[in-house]
Amino acid sequence: MRISVIGCGYLGAVHAACMAELGHDVVGIDVDAAKIAELAAGRSPFFEPGLDELLGAKDGRLRFSTDISEIEQARVHFIAVGTPQVAGGHAADLRYVDAAVTALLPHIGPGHLVVGKSTVPVGTAARLAELVEPTGAQLVWNPEFLREGFAVSDTLSPDRLVYGVRPGDDRATEVLDLVYARPLESGTPRIVTDYATAELVKVSANAFLATKISFINAMAEIAEVTGADITTLADAIGFDARIGRRFLNAGVGFGGGCLPKDIRAFQARAAELGVGQALDFLDDVDQINLRRRQRVVDLLEQHFEGLAGRTVAVLGLAFKPDSDDVRDSPALDIAQRVAALGATVQATDPEAIETARRSQPQLDYRATVDEAVAGADAIVVLTEWRQFRELDPAVVAERTSARLVIDGRNCLDPGAWRQAGFTYVGLGRP
Ligand SMILES: NC(=O)C1=CN([C@@H]2O[C@H](COP(=O)(O)OP(=O)(O)OC[C@H]3O[C@@H](n4cnc5c(N)ncnc54)[C@H](O)[C@@H]3O)[C@@H](O)[C@H]2O)C=CC1
Ligand SMILES: O=C(O)[C@H]1O[C@H](OP(=O)(O)OP(=O)(O)OC[C@H]2O[C@@H](n3ccc(=O)[nH]c3=O)[C@H](O)[C@@H]2O)[C@H](O)[C@@H](O)[C@@H]1O
């Protein structure tokens, strides 16, 4: 099939490359000329395992351009532009989605399918359909559930496919079935539903995941005052198949370009619809999450009785491992809070130093763990990269005079670090 992808950020670039990998002819469009130049040269503008290989291998089946008219050859047009929070508020900013659809209109007609992928407030698809349908094209909402770090495999082999269609629009389903023929043949479940349900599936899935993380972090708060061990507790409740162990890792909580903004936008939309109370619990989910960040700062402050003049080694800046994304990263947030209290922050990350430097230029970035811990008073692990999990504490002890390690992701072996002479503090772990 001939496919266009409008918006080539994280979601769009991965989607375009994977659609080509699935055998389609793809053109990716973005308004950011620098991003398009990188992608056209076969390089990913961000770190995502497996993406460079896909971008480099497509021999003419994958093109990138800033010129929207290049979509005219295509019949299926994915909308993958950003939906950030509005400045100063919680609602989703739909200006990029609206601009992308408006830009498409002169180039589409009967036989074209516009496929919404961006995460949007419920009601958006019905509104956009009113714009698209007069051209003779159809609109379907097909939310995306990929995780950064696993984006390629999640796109090629998704957990499920959700199509939100106009009731009775069988053609949209037939076309998307051709687009996703390979995953469907491999048994991927496919749910065909209405626009509102498809939009809500996406935001409710993210709300559930955020709630699960904040649940375990709330238990970590209780564990901290009772001497209980949150990791053992998570293992034990996770054996119940109704609960499940995944997304029960306590620590500095969730960040990234999606979960935080999506729960807030969901609440804002519910309030607009007059059912804000239904999602009041997400205020707590958000607050528990943000408290965990401050907890690390408080632990440092209490230990040193003030942070002015101290040096703190921060290991990890990305919001999660295998990513260079620092959007709403708990790690970067904590690093800047510690710096704001007068400490020197020597921060390192295997992939996210450059993205972090762009938003927090005042931190002292170090290329390696050895350089980050040199001369430090404390070590704080904030992203559970394999490189940090596998550190040998005895070797680290030789490189630094720091004797306090705060494990913000509960990813280190407390016994090994204590044996090497460190005071180990986890979150919710004795
Ligand atoms: N990043 C992720 O892992 C996932 C993201 N999503 C959703 O996908 C959407 C996109 O997210 P990201 O890719 O992370 O955002 P992003 O900010 O990385 O990318 C958005 C891209 O859209 C481009 N853009 C903006 N207006 C445009 C226009 N009129 N025409 C063409 N391009 C335009 C921007 O230049 C940027 O490159 C959001 O709604 C997000 O919630 C959904 C699932 C996963
Ligand atoms: O809508 C989106 O963009 C995506 O948001 C999340 O994916 P992602 O943001 O890539 O990352 P996650 O793996 O969900 O992690 C989110 C945050 O939660 C934190 N987390 C995760 C799991 C856990 O047990 N504890 C925990 O603190 C991570 O460190 C990270 O900061 C969802 O998992 C995807 O399904 C969804 O498509």
Image (cartoon, rainbow, N blue to C red):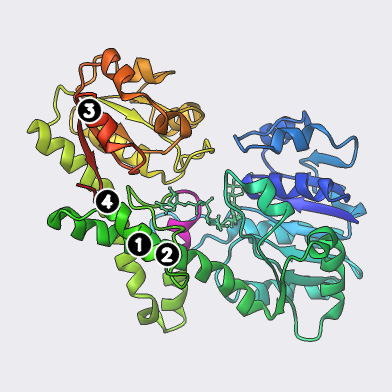
Q: What residue sits 84% from the left and 67% below the top? A: 177
Q: Nearer the viewer, residue 121 or 410?
A: 410
User: Which kind of residue does numbered mark 4 sit on?
Assistant: Arg
**Is residue 267 placed above or below 317 in the rendered structure?**
below
* Residue that mark 4 sits on: 292
Look at the numbered disc 1 and give the secondary structure of its residue.
Answer: helix
Q: Nearer the viewer, residue 166 or 175?
A: 175
Q: CA distance from mark 1 to mark 3?
A: 27 Å
State the mark number for residue 236. Answer: 1
Q: What residue sits 33% from the left and 73% below the top? A: 281
The answer to if 55 sits in the magenta stretch is: no
Secondary structure mostly seen in magenta is: helix
Q: CA distance from mark 3 to mark 2?
A: 30 Å
* Residue that mark 3 sits on: 419
Residues shaded magenta: 256-263
**Is residue 133 placed above or below 61 in the rendered structure?**
below
In the rendered structure, are the residues bearing label 2 and label 1 in contact, judged by CB atoms less than 8 Å apart?
A: yes
Look at the numbered disc 2 and give the secondary structure of its residue.
Answer: loop
User: Which kind of residue does numbered mark 2 sit on?
Assistant: Phe
* Residue that mark 2 sits on: 239
Indicate which disc, 3 or 2, sits on the residue closer to the N terminus. Answer: 2
- Residue 160: horizontal and vertical position, in percent? 68, 66
Q: What residue sits 65% from the left and 62% below the top? A: 159
Q: Residues within 10 Å of mark 2 (few under 14, many from 20)?
A: few
Which quadrant would residue 190 be assigned to in this image? bottom right
Indicate which disc, 3 or 4, sits on the residue closer to the N terminus. Answer: 4
**Is residue 109 placed above or below 54 in the rendered structure?**
below
- Residue 408: horizontal and vertical position, in percent? 31, 42
Does the beta carbon at disc 4 come under 8 Å from ligand 2?
no
